[in-house]
Amino acid sequence: MKKFITTLKNIWSIDELRNKITFTLLLLFIYRLGSFIVLPGIDPNKLANLTNSASSGVLGLLDAFVGGAFSKASIFALGIMPYISASIFMQLMTILVPQMAKVQKEGESGRKKINQWTRYLTIIVTAFQAAAYIGYLKSPSNAGALIPAYSSFFWISTVIILTVGTLFVMWLGEKITDKGLGNGTSLIIMIGILARFPQAFGQEWSARFALRGAGGLLLMLVEILFLIGIVMGLIMLVQGTRKVGVEYAKAIVGNRQMGGARNFLPLKVNSAGVMPIIFAQAILFLPTVFSGFTGDGWAKYFTDHTNIVYMIVYSVCVIAFTFLYTALIFNPKQMADELKRNNGFIPGVKPGQDTADYIGTIMDRITLPGAVLLALVGIFPGIFQLIFGMSQSFSTFFGGTSLLIMVGVILDTLQQIETQLLMRQYDGLMNSGRIQGRQAVPSGM
């Protein structure tokens, strides 16, 4: 405890770090404040049906990402998600399209072009999602919240306000990344997820204590222990690596001997990060969009994460996308060429193609258990909701994208704080070693 207090004092004594933390908290507060501003033309006193219909299935997950702004019909109802979708698409294009890859390799100017194209695509995606959201608001179950006198202006004003709101949230994220602490986009998503935790925890506590008394209290304790265990396991999954021994040939440069050192090539068990889960949820989200966010008919199998059909399809998609995305971002041939160029080699393996095949084989072997564990994490909320009968709002914190994003963002932010401390000759945050962040996804998702 004493070391923890000393670490906090060291963090606050650094002017640059203190200013970054203050600036980040201020912009996050502005984002949360905007989440409670209701769209024009909607009566906030009649949003009960909207809240109930957006509290389950995929819509509940989307509402969790934006901190409840979706169910409040807020000006930030779509949050940062259109920007994330556009960033994912642009990243895939830079991998699949040679012309885009060439632009990306142009350095700072290429990066600015990609970012500008991403912003333009964000406007298009936001406008499309805003139109779908208007259809959802005008559905029979939610139409009671609309003000009839404003109906002639509702469509155009809502599209404009939601688009501007998403662009403003995107701007907040970029400012946090430039002048604040951590990745702004990631922090905005995380703060939206965490904003729902106190309410979800309070509802679960009240339900357990009211229905079962002391037995409910014991069950609540068991749930908390499971949550802690899942978080610890997820940290191991995010930070897990397979170290491949690498040696560098000795070389004499002048009067100095260079190289000859033994090092390790870290291969991450979960190199795809949160992307497979995002892709899988995007695929399963499409039936809901085409059914007008209602989940009627065959779309009902993809709006309930406790459904066995949903779990099977979801797991298959996560495992498939894990291998696909790893194959896109991981290039063993390029890694083998870099080792050869720097006079490095893996003991017992010939440089060149043999090294690439060796690294690729190891990556395939560690990707399979990583993909299976990632799929298991993705369906944990549905499993725990079935086993313990907990509410969906509380079960989302037992796995899936929400928990994976929170763990990854917190590790990344702590890593940046630790780097600032070590640069100024302070001790790190942990005695056992350096904190390792996870591989960033587009825009830090």
Image: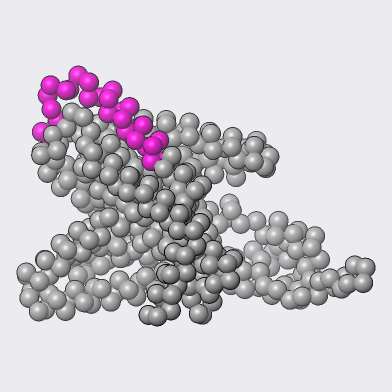
Q: Is residue 370 one of those drawn in magenta?
A: no
**221 or 286: nearer the viewer:** 221
Residue 167 in sight from this viewpoint: yes
Scheme of image coloration: one colour
Q: Position of residue 376 (x, y in %)?
A: 37, 66
Q: Tell me which secondary structure the magenta stretch mostly adopts.
A: helix
Residue pictured at 28% horizontal, 50% vertical: 67
User: Relative to residue 245, is residue 306 drawn left or right?
Assistant: left
Total marks shown come to 0
Percent from the top left, x then y, of residue 205? 15, 68
Magenta-drawn segment = 144-170
Camera-side residue of 19 and 86 = 19
Report the residue at 22% width, 58% height from top: 393
Q: Is residue 278 visible?
A: no
- Residue drawn at (37%, 80%) of the image: 1
Q: Residue at x 51, y 47 (%)?
A: 178
Image spot of residue 179 (x, y percent):
49, 48
- Left of 180 or right of it: where is 81? left
Picture quadrant of residue 122: top left
| Quadrant position of residue 253 | bottom right
241 left or right of 73 in image:
right
Return the x and y of residue 251 as percentages of the image width and height. 88, 70
Task: Check residue 157 for magenta coloring.
Answer: yes
Residue with the most extreme right position: 254
* Residue 316 placement: quadrant: bottom left
